[in-house]
Image (tube, rainbow, N blue to C red):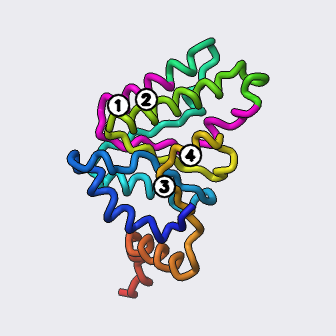
């Protein structure tokens, strides 16, 4: 994956192309961001949505899994149908590896439900790319190695998001400190 240093040029150059219908054939359709928890991956996905001025659809595959036969697949399909219906939009899969975890043993552990969900997702992402449907899939992961390789290959761009440096941490702290109400000094004696 690319480092996050390539992220801002992506946002500044590729995003405007993706929002232009005339350039839909060259637009990126899926990106992933991998990094440690709390390093800003989800926030980066929201930045993309805001810059594109497209609605953000949050998808959590783990929460879409149901206990009844076929329920999980129906709920995932309905969520993808929703994203397609409101396109153009940004579809964010937060912590995607948790939703497709165990895909390798799915046939033995969950009757193939996870494999079915991965198949539905792969098929829809390819269909959107082939048809020029303007759904930008943004996936965040803590451990990209847990994703199936066929899903990893669907991402046009992959970014590694590391923890901020010491200087960046001070800058972040400064931003948050300016939002606080200044503490009142000691009261003057009357």
> In this view of the protein, which residue sits in the foreground, 42 or 112?
112
Residue 84, image x, y percentages: 35, 31
Callout 1–callout 2 Cβ contact below 8 Å: yes
Residue 157, disc = 3
Identify the residue under disc 4. Answer: 153
Q: Range of the magenta residues?
A: 76-104
| Residue at horizontal 36 percent and vertical 40 percent from the top | 135
Crowding around mark 3 (Cα neighbors within 10 Å: few <14, some 14 to 19, many 20+) is some
Could you tell me how far apart the alpha carbons at marks 1 and 2 are, in whole angstroms? 6 Å
Q: Residue 84 carries which label?
A: 1
Q: Which mark's residue is nearer the viewer, 2 or 3? A: 3
Disc 4 from disc 2: Cα separation: 19 Å
**Residue at the (45%, 46%) spot, across then down:** 30
Using the rendered view, name the quadrant where residue 125 is placed: top left
Any mark on residue 80, and which?
A: 2
Q: State the residue in front, 83 or 175.
A: 83
Q: Which of marks 4 and 2 is nearer the N terminus?
A: 2
- Is 56 drawn above or below residue 16 in the view shown? above
User: Residue at coordinates 57% horizontally, 31% vertically from top-left?
Assistant: 63
Q: Nearer the viewer, mark 1 or mark 3?
A: 3
Residue sitting at the far top: 69
């Amino acid at each position: 994956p690319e480092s996050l240093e390539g992220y801002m040029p992506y946002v500044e150059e590729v995003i405007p192309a993706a929002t232009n219908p005339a350039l839909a054939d060259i637009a990126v359709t899926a990106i992933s961001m991998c990094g440690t928890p709390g390093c800003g991956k989800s926030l980066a996905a929201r930045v993309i949505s805001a810059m594109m001025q497209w609605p953000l659809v949050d998808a959590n595959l783990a929460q879409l899994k149901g206990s009844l036969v076929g329920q999980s697949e129906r709920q995932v399909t309905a969520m993808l149908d929703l994203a397609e219906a409101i396109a153009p939009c940004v579809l964010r899969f937060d912590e995607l590896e948790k939703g497709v975890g165990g895909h390798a043993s799915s046939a033995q552990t969950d009757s193939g439900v996870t494999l079915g969900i991965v198949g539905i997702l792969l098929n829809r992402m390819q269909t959107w790319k082939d048809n020029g449907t303007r759904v930008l899939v943004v996936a965040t992961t803590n451990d990209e190695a847990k994703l199936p390789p066929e899903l990893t290959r669907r991402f046009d761009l992959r970014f590694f998001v590391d923890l901020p440096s010491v200087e960046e941490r001070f800058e972040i702290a400064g931003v948050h400190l300016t939002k606080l109400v200044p503490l009142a000094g000691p009261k003057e004696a009357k």
